[in-house]
Image (cartoon, helix red, strand yellow):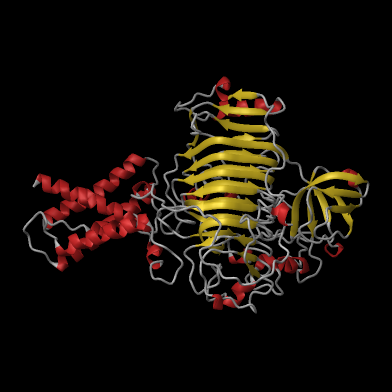
Amino acid sequence: MEFNALVSFALATLFFGVGIQIYGNDLLLRTGIYHYRTRLPQAITYIAVAIALYFSISHPTILSSSGFSWIDLGIFTVAAYIVSFAFEWTLAKINWQNRFLTVAVRLIEIALLVIVQWEYHQAIYVLPFVVAGYYLRNCKFGVVHGKDFVIASHMPSRKKLAGKAKKRKEFSRCMPELPNFSNAGQRNDFGEDFPRFNVCDFGATPDAADDQTEAVQKAIDKAGTSGGGIVFFPKGKYRFRKGFLQINYSNIILEGETGKDGKLLAELILCHNLVSGKRNPWLSPFLITTGESLQRSNIFFGLQFKKRKETFTQSTSLSDPGSDGNILTPEFATNVIKTSHKGETILHVEDSSKLSKFIMLGLYNTTEDGNLLKDILGLDLFREEWQTARRAGPERAPSYQWLIEIKRVIDEHTVELVQPLWRDCDMLYEPALFNVPMLENIGLRHLKLNSTWNGLFRHHGHRRYYTVAQTQEMDYGWNAINMKRVANGFVKNVEFHNFTNPLYVMDSRNIAATNLRFDGYDGHQGIKVYEHACDNLFQDIEFRSHYADMMGGEGNAYGNVFSRVQYVNPVFKPVDYDFHGFSEGPMSPPSHNLFELVSGFALIHCGGSNHMHPSFAQNNVWWNCCAEGELKKSFIFRTRYDKKQYTPKDQCRLFRNSHFYGTVGAYDQKALDPEFIRGDSWGTPVKPDSLYLNQKERF
């Protein structure tokens, strides 16, 4: 009997783990109406579930001669669900950090059910344990350490997107004028002649249990006050238990030791929650935060309304404390005195002597109906619920705000920019220039970033189950890197593990984020370009974790390139391109961004509150992207608006002047109505397949 009980416990544990792999919506993708393929991890799960059904229904008494009843199985399945509910509710309320105890509680749960089963009927019912695991994977509380139980967590079995479509329809034969993305990424190399500052020389102790924040900060500050340097982390784990690391100087590189095989040997571990929830918790500090002396956390930066009205906005999210609309504003420098056209690099100004190296070009709405914003969005009318958009005209919003660098001052009234204008700088919109202090030449490389977050995540929490503090923690409390107010920098060869928000690039330009890997627990925002993030490059990215807002932008984000991005989460929850609208009232949604050679993404997710919609502007480009999980007979990329509020015609109009090229997959061409998609361009790519890498050759 003892041996039989142990076998029963082992089988119950195994099938509990099988259930944890089943994501509810994943089952819908097997209906045949979606672009989706079953791969090895799913095949293993489905075969295991079939075995569970066989054991539970055909052979319920493998180790005993007791009788079997369908009622018995039904009662036990309901009991398993109730017990799982109670245990998960308790774990969500405790919200502890200890992984061992979390696993132990689950084993106690399984053992309790096994004991009841043996006492009740001495039969091996394994299907109820699949049901219990399925509930854990899909419960409303969020999943504490859920990823630890995924059997196939190291079995992605996906091939990288090669850039060539297996099936492709030619929607047009012409090549329209596309935005030029050749200016994205790091402009200049730096750091070869930087002196090195070893963090151990400033008191840091690898693999120590105590806090290393003060010692590492001393090394960073010393490098900064010395004119720049490489802050080096020797092999080991560095734990940060209070505060966060700040880079407030130019010419700083954080670098970790690597092995001969390139293995990352230096690991920085965030050991405490960083959320600052009283004001703008979505701008809470990150473990590594740049430009804090220029722009503190919890405040937006940018141009303000000319005729601002006092207002307070708040979404329905539990983690949103509301915003009073106050933002940090740059210093006015000079007015533009003559129209410059798209593609030109020359601006004509009142007084060039007042300009700094980095400036903000602001264009303002000059009519009550929001003429500039309508032009940016390509729309004739604003819906009633788009309250932020409807403020643009009456309050004279600077809806166009471009963070740009001056290449040279030609004379007292003329300056040259480092790259061409994305749009006309028209005198109709009262253009003006503002000085923007920036840090320059900041880099991070060869580092592994980790945290002690327990992984409890449910997007924006739930009012019945969580406090505001818990919700803000899971949304914004465990953050890795925020490249804020930096011009020319990089994040290279970095691994992110167990962060709800791994990487922000905020109010920065010409950052190259390359060779990155994201894994661990599911979280909130994977890669986000925020506010005035312009001309940044994200390349060779591998996601092994699911994020509610996977990759995209918010605010006046222009010219950003996402290239060679692969989503390989073995659980295969569909993920989306994220567009989040205005950031703050005076701004406008992202435009002129490129997504190319991206695999595993399904939809364009129009996130944020209704009052911040529409979520994106014109002239975004998708080039050779593999859409997976999308409906076969819908628009090739579909907004996640409420179908009751937004008709297909409304949705398609929001894609006006966006471009989709060489998208992998066979799609129903009948779903694409040219009358709805005004200004959209469809076509096949020209070789080579990368639009970004060969920009200079093509344009």
Against 112, residue 643 (above or below) is: below
Q: Position of residue 44 (x, y in %)?
A: 31, 56
Horizontal relation, residue 353 to residue 697: left or right: right
The reply to whether residue 160 is visible in this rendering is yes
The reply to whether residue 304 is visible in this rendering is no
293 or 222: nearer the eye? 222
The residue sitting at the right extreme is 412
The residue sitting at the left extreme is 65
Horizontal relation, residue 645 to residue 104: left or right: right
Against 556, residue 353 (above or below) is: above
Q: Position of residue 579 (x, y in %)?
A: 60, 60
262 or 651: nearer the eye? 262
Against 556, residue 644 (above or below) is: below
238 or 611: nearer the eye? 238
Q: Position of residue 267 (x, y in %)?
A: 49, 33
Hey, which quadrant is residue 245 in on the image? top right
Mark count: 0
| Residue drawn at (66%, 44%) of the image | 511
The residue sitting at the top extreme is 201
Hey, which quadrant is residue 136 in on the image? bottom left
12 or 624: nearer the eye? 624
Quarter that holds the C terminus: bottom right
Q: Position of residue 57 (x, y in %)?
A: 17, 64
The residue sitting at the front extreme is 687
